[in-house]
Each structure stands twice: as C-alpha cells, then as structure tokens.
Image (cartoon, rainbow, N blue to C red):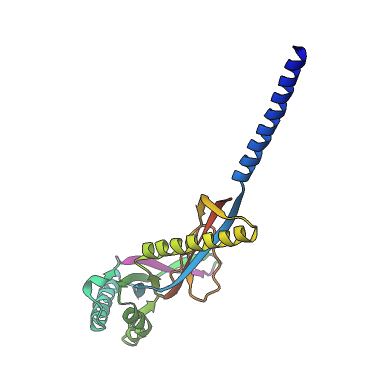
C-alpha cells in the first residue's frame, strides 16, 4: 500500500512540474512584446496673422502729448483702412503714460534728477485671416514714419486655426507608421504581430518649415514662421505571437 501511495505521489509531483512548466512557457510566450515609436509630420501654411505696431509722443505738457498721440491714432486708423483693413480687425490699446527724467551731477557732486517730459505710448493690434495682405502692410508701415509718426512695426505672429484637424491626421499617420514598424520587426523575427497592448502619445510639436528649431519637452509652438511643420510621435507596445 505504501508503494502504491509513493507511486501516486511521484506521478502527481511529475505532473505538477509539467503543468507548471507548460503554464510558465505559455505565460512567457503571451508576455512577449515588441515596442516601437511611430512618427508623422505634415507641412501647413498659417491662416491667421497678428501684427502689432507702436507709436509714441513726448512733450513737457501732458495734454499736448496726449493730443498729438490721438492725432497719430486717427492718422494710423485712416492709413490702415486705406490699405483694406476692416475696423473690427484693429484694436488700439490704452495709452501708457511715462515720466522721463535725466540724471545730472550738481556743483556739489551730488546726483540729481531732472524731469524731461511725458512719454506717451500706444499700440495698435491687427488680427486677420488675410495673411498676405497684413504681412505686406507690416512691411510698408515705414510710410507712417515719413508722415511724421514715430511708428515701430513688430514682427507678425502666425497661427493656424484648425490645429485639431492637423493633430488628428498626424495621430492616424503616426499610429499606422508604428504598426508597420512593429509588423516588420515581428516578421523578421519569425513571429506575427498580436494586439496593441499599450500606446503613449508624444508631444505635438510645431516648428518653422525647414528650420533648425529644437523640439522641447513640453512641445514647441512656433509663431514666427508663416510656413510650419507639425509633428507627433506615439510609442506603441504590441504582443507577439
């Protein structure tokens, strides 16, 4: 009886080892994965421009400086309208008032300040979907200087109003690229690609087209270039069978 019991125990032990080994192999095979990074990029042209210009007047008398600045505002408004800019596309800021001083040394060697006048500054901001037209105006604004206005034109900022469409398109392309890479790796290893196990989306980057801008951890968002390139990456992990 003891012999039979020992045989049964031995068989059970061997069977247990075989089952455990098979389960381990099955589990190990099931956990085999391949990880790839898919990427995609797309060129696009900005469809919104924001341009800002500033002008100033200086006088010992505040009212005089303000009156001159308001005259300049009227002239600039008329100039922009003459160039085809609509009234609702331009915004004039509040007037910034500064007191200017010069510093001198008196006969006793002490530093003293002397009031030299009021310096008033105002900005005009133009936002429009007519990118080429406003870009041209920003380059012609020196005509205002010829008219006696101390006008400074800032570099325009360029935006794209349908970024969501770009992002969705790039996401689809990057996903397809990642899957294709994984299929090639699996095939070359004599396996076939299984299901997607995990996907991690990278940061959406916008750089100037053909520029040497670096990507940033939080995402680059170029506003200085009319022509841009959007790019995205996605890290994908697939099971292999």
Q: Quadrant of residue 153?
A: bottom left
Whether residue 63 is visible: no
- Closer-to-camera residue (149/137): 137
Tell me: residue 217, above or below residue 151. Answer: above
- Closer-to-camera residue (180/157): 180
- Quadrant position of the N terminus in the picture: top right
How many numbered circles does the render carry?
Answer: 0
Q: In screen coordinates, is 73 left or right of 228?
A: left
Q: In the orientation shown, which residue stands out farthest toward the top?
A: 1
Q: Is residue 57 magenta?
A: no
Q: Residue at x 58, y 55 (%)?
A: 192
Q: Residue at x 33, y 71 (%)?
A: 123
Q: Quadrant of residue 9?
A: top right
**Image position, residue 44 (x, y; %):** 41, 73
**Image position, residue 78 (x, y; %):** 23, 80
Whether residue 186 is visible: yes
Tell me: residue 36, above or below residue 10. Answer: below
Q: In screen coordinates, is 208 left or right of 189?
A: left
**Image position, residue 194 (x, y; %):** 54, 51
Tell me: residue 172, above or below residue 22. Answer: below
- Closer-to-camera residue (196/107): 196
- Closer-to-camera residue (84/174): 174
Principal secondary structure, stretch drawn in magenta: strand
Q: Magenta region: which residues?
A: 94-107
**Image position, residue 105 (x, y; %):** 53, 69
Q: Quadrant of residue 6?
A: top right
Q: Residue at x 65, y 58 (%)?
A: 189
Q: Residue at x 44, y 61 (%)?
A: 172
Q: In the orientation shown, which residue stands out farthest toward the right?
A: 3
Q: In screen coordinates, is 50 left or right of 38?
A: left
């Amino acid at each position: 009886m003891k012999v039979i019991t020992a045989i049964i125990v031995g068989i059970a032990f061997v069977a247990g080892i075989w089952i455990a080994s098979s389960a381990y192999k099955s589990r190990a095979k099931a956990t085999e994965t391949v990880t790839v990074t898919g990427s995609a990029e797309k060129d696009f042209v900005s469809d919104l421009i924001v341009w800002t210009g500033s002008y100033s007047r200086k006088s010992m008398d505040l009212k005089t400086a303000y009156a001159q600045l308001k005259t300049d505002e009227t002239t600039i408004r008329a100039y922009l309208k003459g160039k085809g800019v609509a009234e609702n596309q331009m915004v004039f800021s509040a007037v910034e008032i500064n007191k200017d001083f010069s510093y001198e040394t008196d006969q006793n060697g002490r530093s003293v300040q002397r009031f030299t006048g009021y310096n008033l500054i105002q900005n005009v901001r133009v936002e429009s979907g007519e990118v080429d037209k406003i870009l041209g105006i920003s380059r012609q604004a020196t005509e205002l200087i010829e008219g006696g206005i101390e006008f400074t034109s800032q570099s325009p900022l360029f935006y794209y109003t349908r970024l969501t469409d770009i992002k969705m398109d790039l996401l689809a392309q990057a996903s397809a690229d990642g899957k294709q890479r994984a299929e090639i790796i699996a095939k070359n290893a004599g396996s076939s690609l299984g299901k997607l196990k995990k996907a991690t989306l990278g940061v959406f980057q916008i750089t100037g087209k053909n520029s040497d801008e670096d990507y940033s951890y939080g995402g680059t968002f170029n506003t200085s270039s009319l022509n841009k390139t959007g790019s995205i990456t996605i890290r994908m992990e697939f099971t292999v069978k």
